[in-house]
Structure formats: structure tokens, C-alpha cells
Image (spheres, helix red, strand yellow):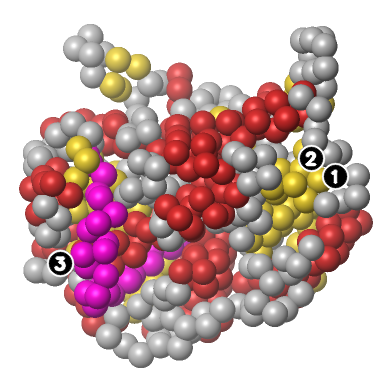
Amino acid sequence: MEDIEIARNAKLEPITKIAQKVNVAEEELEQYGKYKAKISPEVYKKLENKKNGKLVLVTAINPTPLGEGKTTMAIGLADGLRKIGKNAVLALREPSLGPVFGIKGGATGGGHSQIAPMEDINLHFTGDIHAITSANNLLSSMIDNHIYFGNELGFDRVVWKRCVDLNDRQLRKVETGLSEEKNIVPRMDGFDISVASEIMAIFCLATDIKDLKRRLGNIIVGYTKENKPITAKELKADGAMTVLLKDAINPNIVQTLEQTPAVVHGGPFANIAHGCNSVIATKLALKLGDYVITEAGFGADLGAEKFLDIKCRKASLKPDAVVCVATIKALKYHGGMPKEDIKKESIEYLARGFENLERHVDNLKNRYGLNVIVAINKYTHDTQKEVDFLKEKLQEKEIDLSLVESWEKGGEGATDLAEKIVKLVENPYNFSFVYEDNQTIQEKIKAVATKVYGAEEVEFTKEAITKIQEIQNLGYGNLPVCIAKTQYSFSDDPKNLECKEPFNIHVQDVVLRAGAEFIVVLTGKIMTMPGLPKEPSAEKIDLDEDGNIVGIF
């Protein structure tokens, strides 16, 4: 049975009842139909002095075409904790339409570990990403309008891009203003996908509506001939953008198929953005639940690194435990096993692929000082010999292992992991960042590249070095770095899966995000506007004869 059919056949409770489970009253909700709602900011104020719950981060090995099931694991763990009597709450990202219609598909879990209503969440949901897109493009139109009417602020170059929440490589570089109207100024422009927009990053890092407006005003949209930055506040665009986002900034509440409350809000990619749900949603969830399960995008080298070095740094958060998700077949794939043989037992390929898992676990445990457990998404073709091999290897590292069957069994298939998490979060730990604020930008980049990725060195283009110097001269050198890198490898080469040979990280460009308060570092051939695959998921999505959506997975 397809995920969408499982979700459609599940019995959902009215969202008011789900909210009651975490002591949120009906009058504190803004409902979007029967099964989704936004939570009033007054709820956090009411609970501000309540002790925080335990924060559990779910991350993974480097992803493969086989899929590791990170979101499915997070949902299963939350359901599993509820199964053993714990007050658990999910705090997840919102899906982007780009991957839904592209290669990845939906992002609401799978099998019997899903959040619902699945179709709504994967498509327009409560309109948050549309609001972000509109705010982004309002700013773009105000920039060009300002230039059209005399350019009082003295724009010499515009660095702000338009955006759309779809994969469309044709829009990466475009020329605008070609109507030949009097005074219109043609210029080169481009589009990012909405989830890579700085406004999405701001949206996810802002602490409240006032902080949101402050950050929006600080966005640098261009520079004068004297290289003086021009901000959105100087364009008087910050107020209107805030108005467009005033409802979106409130977190959304939905449920799992087993009626576990799920706060779903914000959705930046982790390969080209910082990959975490909103600070507002995470902090609210920590007041609502005794155990909060959250997730960071792609592998631990991307999502977890940014969760820890950016989000935790800025929001004064720290996870009490980390779950690193893997599958045995994906480990064999990382070990070089041909895809067509992946279901066959092989300790040789598993041993080679184990190095990928080992690196991630070592980073989380020894670079960041965190409590770690490995969760294996179990498949029927996984053999006992392969499982025993993993257990033995992880025991050498003093890391526990849990076999999880939440895709097939829901929360019941994750109770072992849930029980181990309850014990693990009570263990002492010594969380620390990979770099400090007062290090130079180059030092921060090198720290992530060498300590987390395992690179030998970092190579910078001349353009990147020039921009780094400009950023430091403007007084932004203390900001954290957000490295845009392929998700498929520790290196910046997506084909270098095993990383057996020494490698360098190649920094192509550096972009200041003054509103988000971090510096984007572009490596390899990473793009901030993805393209569609040869056979996009959009080709399979349709309505059946009864008007039901089919093809979302």
C-alpha cells in the first residue's frame, strides 16, 4: 500500500483534541480546517517559565538514492515514546514543493510513521512558504521600482534574487527589465528556490515578530559604487514584508497517524541553507512536551552541523541526545556495492560502508560532545550476521544500537529506541561548537571542513577571498558560516561516496546574509535553484476518478 493510501485510511482526531493533549486550548488555535491549525504566540508566553523538555535530534548518514528514512524514524520515535507513556512532541520542517514534484517526493514520513493530513502538508499546507515567497519577491519589486524612480540610494549592484518554490534550472540566471519602457533599467537577475531564500532562514531563526522585522530590515539587497551596503530597511520594505509574514510566523500543529502532536514550521534545505525548522517552533515544543523529537536535513555533516553550529548557537539550545539513522543497504551502497546486489548479504561491503556511519558518530560524540545512539531502519532482507557485525563495531565505540521497524509497525516498532532514548537523555554530556565566534571566516570554514568533513585543506577562489575580506571589513566577521555542499558525500564531489583518498573542499563563493546573521559558503558545484530530474515526480501526481490525489510518496 502506498504512503498516501495508508495516510488516507488512518483515523485522525480533530486538531482541537490533539492540541488538548499538550494543554493548548481551542481558543489558542487558528484552525485551517479540521486537522491543522496555527498556535497563538500567547501559548509560549503562558508557558515561558515552564521547564523545558528533553531535546532529541534525529540526523543520518549521507543520504543515498535508497533512502534512509530519517523523518520516518523521527515520527516513529515520537509515537514510540507515547507508546511507553511519555509526553512526546514532534518538531519538524515543512516540505517544499520543489522536491515534492522533483526527485525526492514528499517529506511527511512513510508507511505507518507519517504526519497528517499528508497531502495538505506536502502541498500548500497553511501557506507559510507562499508567504515567504511573496515577501521575498515584494522586496525584489521594491528594489527595481526604487531604481526606476531615480535610484536615490545609489544602487550600483543588486545582490538580492527573486524566488519560487519549485525546481526550475531555467531561472538560475535571467535578464529582467526588457520591456523597453522609458527609465526601466535592464539587469541580470536570478531565482533561488524559496527554501533557500534568506527570508526562510530569517523566518526560522527569528525569536518573535519583533525580531523578525529587525532581521528583515537588516537584509543587504545591494551595494553602492563605494561598496556601501543598502538594506531592506532603507528601502522601507521591512514593514510590508513583516505584514506578509505575520500569520505565517505562528507555528503549525498537526498529528501523526497515531495522534502524536506535531509542530511543523519552516523548511530550509540543508545542502543549500541551514536545514532546521523554526526556533519559535522548537522552543514552543520544548514547553509543550517532556520529550521533543526534531530533525535536521540530509546527513549529519550538513543538517546536524548547521543545527548545532548555527541554530543552537543563536537560540541557546543543546540536544540531550542525537539519533543517527542508517540502513544496512545504504551502508553497503556507501561501501561500493552495486545497487542491483544491495539485498544480498555482504559483510565486506558493509564494513567499507560502515566508515561513513563511523565518521558521523565520531563527529557527534567527539567533536560536539553529545550522547549518540544509532538507529537502523530495519528491512526484511537484513541478515542477523549483518546486524551482529554492526552491533559489535558500535560497541567498540561505546555506542548503542536500536533496530527500528516504525515504517511497518508505527510506534510499536520504535519502542526499543524510545526506551533507550529515555535513558540516554539522562546521561551527562559536554556539548561544544566546532568553532568560536571570534575566529576568522576562513578559520571557521576550515574548522568545519577539516573537523567535520575530514578534508585535508580548503581552497578558496580569488572571488571568495575578496568577498570574505569585504564581509570582515563591514564588521560581520563574527557570524557563523552556513556551508552549501552536496549531501551525498563528506567531500564537495557528489560522486566521491567513500572518500577513501585525501580531499580538499573548494570554496567558490561567499555570500553575506546579514538578516539571517550567517555567512553562506558555496562549495563545489552546489546550486541554490535545483533542477528537475529526467522523470520528475510531477509526472506521477494526479487526481483519480474519485477526486483523490495519487502519486505523492
**At x 23% / y 19%, what residue is drawn?**
548
- Residue 350 drawn in magenta: no
Residue type indicated by callout 2:
Leu
- Residue 53 drawn in magenta: yes
* Element carrying mark 3: loop
**Quadrant in the rendering for residue 335:** bottom right
Residue bearing mark 3: 87
* Element carrying mark 1: loop
Judge by depth and name the residue closer to the eye, 425 or 481: 481
Where is residue 112? Give x, y as percent. 20, 46
Where is residue 367? Give x, y as percent. 56, 81
Q: Relative to 246, say whether 330 is above or below.
A: below
Cα–Cα span, label 2 and label 3:
54 Å
Judge by depth and name the residue closer to the eye, 301 or 25: 25
Q: Earlier in the sequence, mark 2 or mark 3?
A: 3
Where is residue 354? Give x, y as percent. 51, 68
Q: Earlier in the sequence, mark 3 or mark 1?
A: 3
- Residue 444 visible in the snapshot: yes
Tell me the tag on residue 11.
Answer: none
Look at discs 3 and 1 and give the one toward the viewer. 1
Residue type indicated by callout 1:
Thr
